[in-house]
């Protein structure tokens, strides 16, 4: 029992120092900060969007991104190409669009999606 007291004291002393030790590493510094990156995406502008959607379905002559798109929240099982990529190059996350049973679907892992109705 005395042996476990010493192990506990050593562990507590190590936790107080500026370095945390692990059996698999020599030491990990506790300094620094964690930054989070907002996961955002922006759709292509209206003209580019329409041009690109017509590659997927040439019968589409106009589109309203606020009403004509169906957001899919589960990761789709399809394989996407550049034809399915509908986000701007500045987007932090991609937006994929595909047409299934006359429904225009889109998926993005982004939490914030800007429709870019320009």
Image (cartoon, helix red, strand yellow):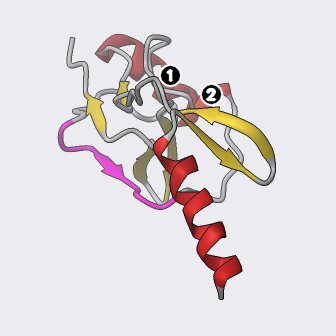
Q: Which residue lies furthest to the front in this view?
A: 2
Magenta segment, which residues?
A: 66-74
Magenta region, main secondary structure:
loop
At x 71%, y 50%, the residue is 22
Q: From the viewer's side, name the closer residue of 20 and 116.
A: 20
At x 25%, y 19%, the residue is 116
Q: In what element is the residue under mark 1? A: helix
Q: In what element is the residue under mark 2? A: helix
Give residue 83's mark.
2
Q: How crowded is mark 1: few (under 14 residues within 10 Å), some or many (20 or more)?
A: some
Is 70 a magenta residue? yes
* Comes first in the chain, label 1 or label 2: 1
Give residue 89's mark.
none
Q: In this view, does 82 lie above or below 74?
A: above
Image quarter in which the C terminus is found: top left
Give residue 52's mark.
1
Question: Is 17 left, or right, of 63 in this rendering?
Answer: right
Q: Position of residue 112 (x, y in %)?
A: 28, 35
Image quarter in which the N terminus is found: bottom right
Q: In this view, does 10 lie above or below 7?
A: above
Question: Is 118 left, or right, of 89 in this rendering?
Answer: left
Q: From the viewer's side, name the closer residue of 46 and 33.
A: 33
Q: How crowded is mark 2: few (under 14 residues within 10 Å), some or many (20 or more)?
A: few
Question: Is 75 left, or right, of 103 in this rendering?
Answer: right
Q: From the viewer's side, name the closer residue of 60 and 45.
A: 45
Q: Where is residue 20 in the image (x, y as percent from the top left)?
A: 59, 43
At x 39%, y 38%, the residue is 110
Is 113 a magenta residue? no
- The answer to which quarter of the image holds residue 9 is bottom right
- The answer to which quarter of the image holds residue 7 is bottom right
Q: Given contact means CB atoms under 8 Å apart, are the residues at marks 1 and 2 in contact?
A: yes
């Amino acid at each position: 029992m005395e042996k476990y007291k010493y192990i506990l004291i050593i562990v507590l002393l190590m936790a107080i120092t500026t370095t945390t030790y692990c059996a698999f590493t020599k030491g990990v510094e506790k300094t620094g900060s964690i930054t989070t990156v907002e996961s955002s995406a922006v759709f292509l502008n209206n003209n580019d969007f329409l041009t690109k959607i017509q590659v997927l379905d040439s019968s589409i002559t106009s589109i309203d991104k606020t009403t004509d798109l169906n957001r899919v929240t589960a990761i789709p099982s399809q394989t996407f190409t550049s034809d399915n990529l509908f986000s701007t190059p500045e987007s932090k996350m991609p937006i994929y669009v595909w047409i299934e049973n006359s429904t225009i679907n889109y998926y993005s892992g982004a939490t914030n999606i800007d429709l870019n109705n320009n």
